[in-house]
Image (spheres, rainbow, N blue to C red):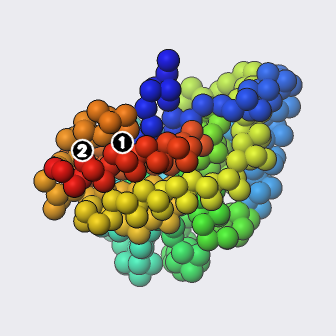
C-alpha cells in the first residue's frame, strides 16, 4: 500500500504518479545518449517546449531547481545581482543555490505574491558604478507558490518587461506552474514566452510527469546552459524514458488542469467561513493563514492526518492544500468531510 492508497494527499502536486498511458509512452520511448545530443525523445521534447513559448531552444533538466539555477547563471555573472520577491522559490526553496553555485547576490522586494508593483521593482534596480552591486536580472514566479497559486496579470508582466528593457536587465520566469496560469487566464504560452529572456517550466507538478523541467531561451543561451547543466551534475544519458513522460503530459494533461482549479475552489469555499483562507484561489493551491485560529499549522496537519487527509505545513501558522492529477472528486469529498469539522471543533 502506498501513501496515495491510504490518504487523500493534498501536500503538493509533486506527489502524482505516472498514469497508465504515460507509463506506456515511457516504455516505448526511443532513446540515445543525451549528453552527446543523441536522444531523439529528449530532442523532440526540447523542440516542442521551445516552440510552445516562441523561443529558439530549450534544455531538459532533472529538476525545477536546477532549471532555475541554470537560467539565473545565464543571466547574472558571479558577484552581480538578482532581484526577486522575498517569497520567491529561487531564494526560499533552493537552499541558497544562486549564491552557492552561481556566486549571485540577491535582493528582494516585500512578499506580495502575484500582486507585484513594477514601479517598486524599477526603484530597486542598481546600475553599474560606485562599487555598488549592479542588477542584472529580475525573476518572477508564475504562478506564485507561497502566494497561494496567484497569477501575475499579463499587464503587470508587460510593465515589468518595460522596466527591464529600460534598465538594460534581463527578465526570468520561474514558470513551474505556468501551465496553470495559461489555463486560468487564457493567456497563450507564446505570449508569456515573448516577455522573458529565460523561463523554467516544470513537467512534474501539475502535468504529472515523474521527473523534469526545461530551461527555455535563445539558442546561444541554451548552448551555454548545456555546459552549466553538466557542471551541476545534470547531464543525463538515456533520458528519453523521462522525456517521453513529459511529452505525454504536454499532450494529455494541460487542459485537465481546469479540473484541479475547480477542486481547489471547492476546498476554498469550505474553509473560508473559518477565517483561514489566505488569498483568493485562482488555480490549484489553497493557502491557509491560521494566525487568528486556535489551531496552528502542525496541529491542523496532525488532526487532518488522523482523518486520512495530508496537508502541507509551510510555517508555524501557514498551511497549504494542493489539488492535482492524483486527487479525485471522491478524495475532495473526503477532505470536505474532515477539514471543516476540524476547524469548527478546534
Residue 80's tag is none
The quarter of the displayed image where residue 96 is located:
top left
Q: Is residue 5 left or right of residue 125?
A: right
Residue 300's tag is 2
The residue where tag 1 is placed is 311
Q: Label 2: how many residues lie within 10 Å, few (<14), some (14-19) or many (20+)?
A: many
Question: Tag count in the figure?
Answer: 2
Q: Identify the residue shown where x is 76% and y is 52%.
A: 50
Question: Residue 191: where, in percent of width, then height?
Answer: 70, 70
Contact between labelled residues 1 and 2, with CB atoms less than 8 Å apart: yes
The residue nearer to you, when weighing 264 against 42, is 264
| Residue at the far top in the pictured view | 1
Disc 2 element: helix
Q: Identify the residue shown where x is 73% and y is 29%.
A: 20
Question: Residue 142: where, in percent of width, then height?
Answer: 53, 60
Q: Identify the residue shown where x is 25% and y is 63%.
A: 274
The quarter of the displayed image where residue 81 is located:
bottom left
Q: Is residue 169 left or right of residue 19?
A: left
Question: Residue 306: where, in percent of width, then height?
Answer: 29, 33
Question: In this view of the protein, can residue 1 be seen by the observer?
Answer: yes
Question: In this view of the protein, can residue 178 be seen by the observer?
Answer: no
Disc 1 element: loop
Amino acid at each position: 500500500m502506498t501513501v496515495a492508497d491510504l490518504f487523500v494527499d493534498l501536500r503538493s502536486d509533486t506527489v502524482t504518479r505516472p498514469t497508465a498511458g504515460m507509463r506506456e509512452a515511457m516504455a516505448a520511448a526511443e532513446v540515445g545518449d543525451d549528453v552527446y545530443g543523441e536522444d531523439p525523445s529528449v530532442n523532440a521534447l526540447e523542440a516542442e517546449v521551445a516552440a510552445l513559448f516562441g523561443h529558439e531552444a530549450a534544455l531538459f533538466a532533472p529538476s525545477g531547481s536546477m532549471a532555475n539555477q541554470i537560467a539565473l547563471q545565464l543571466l547574472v555573472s558571479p558577484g552581480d545581482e538578482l532581484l526577486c520577491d522575498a517569497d520567491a522559490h529561487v531564494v526560499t526553496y533552493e537552499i541558497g543555490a544562486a549564491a552557492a553555485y552561481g556566486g549571485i547576490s540577491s535582493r528582494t522586494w516585500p512578499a506580495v505574491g502575484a500582486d507585484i508593483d513594477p514601479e517598486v521593482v524599477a526603484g530597486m534596480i542598481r546600475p553599474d558604478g560606485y562599487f555598488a552591486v549592479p542588477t542584472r536580472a529580475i525573476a518572477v514566479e508564475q504562478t506564485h507558490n507561497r502566494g497561494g497559486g496567484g497569477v501575475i496579470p499579463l499587464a503587470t508582466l508587460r510593465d515589468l518587461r518595460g522596466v527591464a528593457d529600460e534598465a538594460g536587465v534581463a527578465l526570468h520566469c520561474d514558470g513551474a506552474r505556468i501551465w496553470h496560469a495559461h489555463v486560468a487566464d487564457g493567456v497563450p504560452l507564446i505570449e508569456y514566452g515573448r516577455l522573458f529572456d529565460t523561463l523554467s517550466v516544470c513537467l512534474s507538478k501539475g502535468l504529472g510527469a515523474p521527473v523534469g523541467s526545461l530551461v527555455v531561451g535563445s539558442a546561444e543561451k541554451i548552448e551555454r546552459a548545456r555546459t552549466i547543466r553538466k557542471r551541476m551534475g545534470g547531464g543525463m544519458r538515456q533520458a528519453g524514458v523521462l522525456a517521453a513522460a513529459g511529452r505525454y503530459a504536454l499532450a494529455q494533461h494541460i487542459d485537465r488542469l481546469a479540473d484541479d482549479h475547480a477542486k481547489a475552489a471547492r476546498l476554498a469555499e469550505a474553509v473560508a467561513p473559518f477565517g483561514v483562507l489566505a488569498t483568493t484561489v485562482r488555480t490549484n493551491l489553497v493557502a491557509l493563514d491560521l494566525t487568528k485560529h486556535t489551531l496552528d499549522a502542525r496541529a491542523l496537519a496532525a488532526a487532518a492526518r488522523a482523518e486520512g487527509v495530508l496537508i502541507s505545513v509551510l510555517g508555524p501558522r501557514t498551511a497549504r492544500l494542493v489539488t492535482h492529477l492524483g486527487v479525485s472528486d471522491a478524495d475532495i469529498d473526503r477532505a470536505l468531510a474532515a477539514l471543516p469539522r476540524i476547524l469548527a471543533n478546534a
